[in-house]
Image (cartoon, helix red, strand yellow):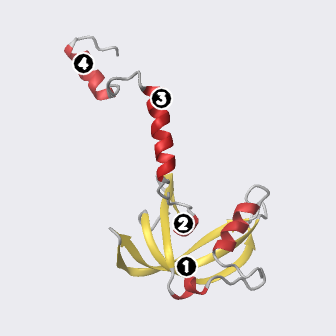
Amino acid sequence: MAKIEQGFYKGRLIKSGVSESKNKKTPFIYLTFLIDRKVVMGEDEFLDFDYERDICFYFTEKTEERTEKDLLALGFNGDYSIPKFRQDLYDVGTKLFCEHTGEGDRVYENWSICSLGGGVKEEAPKSLIQKLNAKWKAHNNKFTEAPKSFEEEVLDAKEADDIPY
């Protein structure tokens, strides 16, 4: 059950280790962060309570390459028996993102490290924006105005007394 609301936080790495999932025995490395601040409008706000949350990196055939790149970006020492990472993760901490998954009573927190791009989207380069804009104009220049929204169509149908449902 989710205890922390979705959003950006800051936390310091306090421990790490290696384990495997209970059912499929999939190996993973976990990083435990002590989360003490929420980031609101770019400003840190200290939380009333500190929370410990794990972020896991799994080693499957499909994820192994990505996991190794992420670990490298975090300054992994390469020793799975005593995994260590960049010192700033322990001293200063890093920005984390919490999103919720599931529904009803089964809503869970899903944590990611922002510098790895897990829950955060980086702004696209200007060249990509220009390319996408050009493609859009080339494919959609036949529209002289934006299509009507559902609400506008319903209002038009009511005015014409021609409600299709």
Above or below, 159 against 116 in this view is above
Q: What element carries label 1?
A: strand
In percent of the image, x 44 and y 72: which residue is there?
9
Q: Nearer the viewer, mark 3 or mark 1?
A: 3
Q: Which quadrant of the structure image shows residue 16?
A: bottom right
State how far apart marks 1 and 4 are (Cα): 54 Å
**Residue density around tag 1, few if under 14, some if 14–19, many if 20 or more, within 10 Å:** many
Q: Which residue matches tag 1?
A: 33
State how far apart marks 1 and 2 are (Cα): 10 Å
Q: Nearer the viewer, mark 3 or mark 4?
A: 3
In percent of the image, x 50 and y 34: which residue is there?
135
- Which mark is first along the chain, 3 or 2? 2
Q: Is mark 2 on a helix, strand or loop?
A: strand
Q: Which residue matches tag 4?
A: 156
Q: Position of residue 116 (x, y in %)?
A: 58, 66
State how far apart marks 2 and 3 are (Cα): 40 Å
Left or right, 11 with reference to 159: right
- Which mark is first along the chain, 4 or 3? 3
Residue 32 vs residue 144, the one in the foreground = 144
Q: Which residue matches tag 3?
A: 138
Amino acid type of the residue that numbered disc 1 sits on in the rendered structure: Phe
Q: Do the residues labelled 1 and 2 touch (CB within 8 Å)?
A: yes
Above or below, 103 against 134 in this view is below
State how far apart marks 3 and 1 are (Cα): 48 Å
Q: Which residue matches tag 2?
A: 111
